[in-house]
Structure formats: C-alpha cells, structure tokens
Image (cartoon, grey):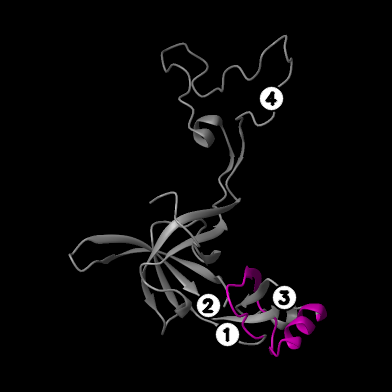
Amino acid sequence: MTTGIIGRKLGMTRVFAEDGTAVPVTVIEAGPCQVVQVRMADVQLGFGVKRPIRTTKAELGHAKKAGLDAAPHVIRTFQVAGDAPAAGSTVTVQMFAPGELVKVTGTSKGRGFQGVVHRHGFAGGPASHGNTRHRKPGSISPGTDPSRVIKGKKMPGHQGARRHTELGLRVVRIDSERNLLFVRGAVPGSKNGIVMVAKQGGPSRHD
C-alpha cells in the first residue's frame, strides 16, 4: 500500500475529546486518489479532475494508460510499504487510523518582502527618541576579514511561499463518508491549498 495521500486543506476547527477537552484540529479533504502509475519503489497518485481545456495530450494519454477517463488535477509520488496497489485503483482516507502519527507537506503562505524583525524575529534597535535604527539588521559582516557577507546570513527578503513539512501530527478523527481527515494542530498553507499527508514511519521529534 502507499504511505501517503493527496488532500486539500479546508481550514481549522476544534473537536471535543471524551473528557471534554477541546482539541484544535485542521480539516483536510484527503482523497479519494487514483493510482496513475506504479513503479518499482513508489506510486503516482492523482487528486481531483483537470478540465479538458487545460489538459494536454500527454497528460490525457498518461491518465488513460491507467484506465482513467480524465487527467488528475494534481499528481504526486509516494513510497510503497508492502504490496503496491494496482494502476487505476483508488486510495482513500481509510488508510489512516485515529491516534496515528502523520506528517503533512504543503506550501506555506506567502508574506512578500519582509525585514529581519518580521522575517527572522530580530529584536530591532532602541525605540528611543532620535534613534534611526528601530528595525534595521545592524552589522552584517566583518570588515577586513573576510570582507564579504557570509552565505546564509539572515537578511531581509521574500518570506513564505515555500515547501514545508510539519512532523508529528496526530490523527484525531476520520470521516470516511466525506473523505475528511482531522489532524491535531496546524498544517502549512492557506485554505484550499494542496497538501500531502504521509505516515510518520517512526517516532516524532515532538513526542
């Protein structure tokens, strides 16, 4: 079986545990996903349906080879654990179980060009009257040696809009009828953003 599934982030809400504790969760529309291609150690899964006017002949031929009528909107590759599913079969949210640890990969929200205070959490300069370096980074490199800015220096620049994986999220609830996955905590991306949910496969750094 595959180790993950493609989904869409719907937003956040809360559910109540048996003892009445409120648990913050992210609701993900996980699947159903069609198996587009089976390779040696991984499989290609497709999520959604692409409009015919947006579909190329290569994409349509790739989908028809797996027995699909239309090209998927999103295609992602996952590893295989055990027996590989057959091409054209369907992977659903039932592959997960409540209490299981998963990792969610998505594209974080774009924040545009930001300074070091917002981007890296710098404290900034003094806020006293007459000061002109409230939010400036300060010195960025030594002068004589090496006379250059070291690679990786925290500087102003574009923030967000990057691929990010959140580890150690626990599955709280599964709604197989509506293909919904309730995961404790926040996941990267905005509402309706495409995410990949995969089994943790080992202990998490958060436990």
Real-space CA distance between mark 1 and mark 4, rounded to the nearest whole angstrom: 50 Å
Displayed quadrant of residue 170: bottom left
Real-space CA distance between mark 2 and mark 4, rounded to the nearest whole angstrom: 45 Å
Question: Residue 59, percent across and down?
Answer: 77, 78
- The residue identified by callout 3 is 39
Residue type of the residue flagged with mark 3: Arg
- The residue identified by callout 1 is 90
Q: Is residue 60 magenta?
A: yes
Residue type of the residue flagged with mark 4: Ile
Name the residue rendered at 65%, 69% in the picture: 76
Residue 114 to residue 175: above or below: above
C-beta proximity under 8 Å, tags 2 and 1? yes
Q: Earlier in the sequence, mark 2 or mark 4?
A: 2
Q: Nearer the viewer, mark 3 or mark 1?
A: 3
| Pointer 3 local density, CA inside 10 Å: few below 14, some 14–19, many at least 20 | few
| Pointer 4 local density, CA inside 10 Å: few below 14, some 14–19, many at least 20 | few
Task: Say whether residue 10 is left or right of residue 54.
Answer: left
Real-space CA distance between mark 4 and mark 3, rounded to the nearest whole angstrom: 43 Å
| Pointer 1 local density, CA inside 10 Å: few below 14, some 14–19, many at least 20 | some
Q: For this rendering, which residue is in front, 26 or 159?
A: 26
Name the residue rendered at 70%, 90% in the picture: 67
- The residue identified by callout 2 is 31
Question: Residue 51, percent across and down?
Answer: 68, 80
Give me the disc on residue 44: none
Displayed quadrant of residue 112: top right
Q: Earlier in the sequence, mark 3 or mark 2?
A: 2
Question: Residue 199, percent across and down?
Answer: 50, 66
Image quadrant where one finds the N terminus: bottom right
